[in-house]
Image (cartoon, rainbow, N blue to C red):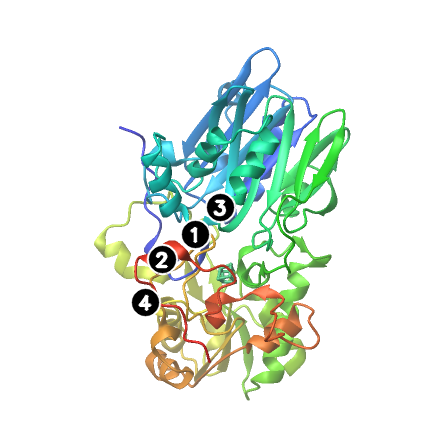
Amino acid sequence: MPKQMPPAHPFDDDKLKEECGIFGAIGLTDAANFVALGLHALQHRGQEAGGIVSHDPELGFNSERRFGYVRDNFTSQSLMERLPGPLAIGHVRYSTAGSKGAAIRDVQPFFGEFSMGGAAIAHNGNITNAIALRKELIERGSIFQSSSDTECIIHLMARSLQRNIPERMEDALRRVEGAFSIVAMTRTKLIGVRDPLGVRPLVLGQLGEGWILSSETCALDIIGARHVREIEPGEMVVISAKGGVESHFPFRRQSSRFCIFEHVYFSRPDSIIGGRSVYETRHQIGVELAREAPVDADLVCPVPDSGTPAAIGFSHESGIPFAMGIIRNQYMGRTFIEPTEQIRNMGVRLKLNVNRALIEGKRVILVDDSVVRGTTSRKIKEMILDAGAAEVHFRIASPPTAWPCFYGVDTPQREKLLAATMSEDEMRDHLQVNSLKFISLDGLYRAVGEAGGRNTKCPQYCDACFSGEYPVAPSDMIDKGFELKAAE
Ligand code: SF4
């Protein structure tokens, strides 16, 4: 039996979850060690499992895949010695496509042996036509090893008639719909690709003579690499240790639709997106929120940790003092305990505690990044009131999340999203708070640097989970009965 990952804590379920982080390195001695560090810095993007594939000119390809945190697996000397060579890629995952909590066979990177040599691939995103592709490939004789959508790319590459692996990958990716940032490797090359809309992030870094690909810049910092640039939407880079970086644009050029939620929540605040710190953007979201939804109160408190920069921005703009009214238990990891019913009932109190001395008798503004099901918001409100707060006002650093994401983020079904079934006032009453306000979509666009707000004819970002306007039709889900928003 494969080792199973301990279950996630139940109170982490009320957040959207980014599915994956990817990292690759070439031209570095024992590249897998750098990949392990990079994946550790990307652990916020996926905690279920991780894997690394390396290549050594004498020992060939080697692969290790494990459930659990990078720090618990890829720090063992004996394991890392099994990943030799100057070229390696890695992946941390939560999981969207592919079964959750499933077998080790679903853990990336995936490996394929082709007539011109082997290749490994790791993917962040979600292929929205994977069910149709899988069916077609199986009918034509492909034998799938996993339930992951990413494996379709390997089978499409196997069927391509192109001469080399980068060309086969181009061929395969032209058949794929949805969101993908990819790191891949052959025996001698590191390859990075972003889908034509650039929904998911991918950046290029340099460390000495070596090159790095990473989901986020925070993972370059941990190994001391220089941030060179973002891989552009629709770009494929093929990197060799001696030949440097070759860039191609194999897909039809389209306007970029980067995931706006990366700014709000998924990316780490110390990462840089579009030349600007994520922390700074989140701070600005708080400023916009204070302008759009002011309220008379005594304290601004973040829901830790992701609400903190926006709460600081809200406090600066409103002049209302900032306070850490809720303290997070930093050591509450997945591996703490297998929750029993009794522990489950303690819920959010295991992770967060109210700073009663600050809160008692105060009118409190709570700033959170999002409301998904609303279950955690309600529990936090109860804790704040139990601690003696006079009023509770929620300010949310994203617009109402009313639509599921099909581009590599784990979202509940639409009917489970609070904002899909209730208006803002109804949500306020449901949560039993004194007031509840979300930043507007225009306000969010202004905060990420679009001074004119959202261009309604040609939005500058993917914002489908707020707007219901999907930049790529989720064709598998439509086949399963998902109804798109009616045209206005
Ligand atoms: S639907 Fe939302 S979470 Fe998904 S890619 Fe678009 S903005 Fe990001």
User: What is the CA distance from the residue labelled 4 to the residue labelled 3?
Assistant: 29 Å
Which one is earlier in the sequence, the residue at label 4 or at label 2? 4
Q: Earlier in the sequence, mark 2 or mark 3?
A: 3
Residue identifier under label 2: 477
Dot 2 alpha-carbon crowd within 10 angstroms: few under 14, some 14 to 19, many 20 or more: some
Q: Is mark 3 within 8 Å of ligand 1?
A: no
Give the CA separation, mark 2 to mark 3. Answer: 15 Å
Residue 181: % across, % down: 56, 45
| Picture disc at residue 108 | none
Badge 4: few (under 14), some or many (20 or more) residues near its Cα, within 10 Å? some
Task: Quickly name the residue at label 4.
Answer: 416
The circle on residue 176 is 3
Give the x, y percent position of residue 439.
55, 77
Closer to the N terminus: mark 4 or mark 1? 1
Q: Amino acid at mark 2?
A: Met
Which kind of residue does numbered mark 3 sit on?
Answer: Val
Q: Is residue 233 left or right of residue 70?
A: right
Q: Secondary structure at mark 2?
A: helix
| Nearer-the-camera pick, 302 or 368 | 368
- Amino acid of disc 4: Lys
Residues under labels 4 and 2: Cα distance?
Answer: 16 Å
Q: Considering the numbered disc 3 on the image, is that residue within a helix, a strand or a loop? A: loop
Q: Amino acid at mark 1?
A: Thr
User: Is 457 in front, or is 245?
Assistant: 457
Query: Within the image, what quadrant is residue 443 found in?
Result: bottom right
Task: From this view, report whether residue 160 is shown above or below residue 136.
Answer: above
Say which of marks 4 and 2 sits in front: 2
Q: Earlier in the sequence, mark 1 or mark 3?
A: 1
- Quadrant housing the N terminus: top left
Please report contact status of discs 1 and 2: CB closer than 8 Å, yes or no. yes
The secondary element bearing badge 4 is classed as helix
Which residue is painted at 33% across and 57% down in the image?
Answer: 479
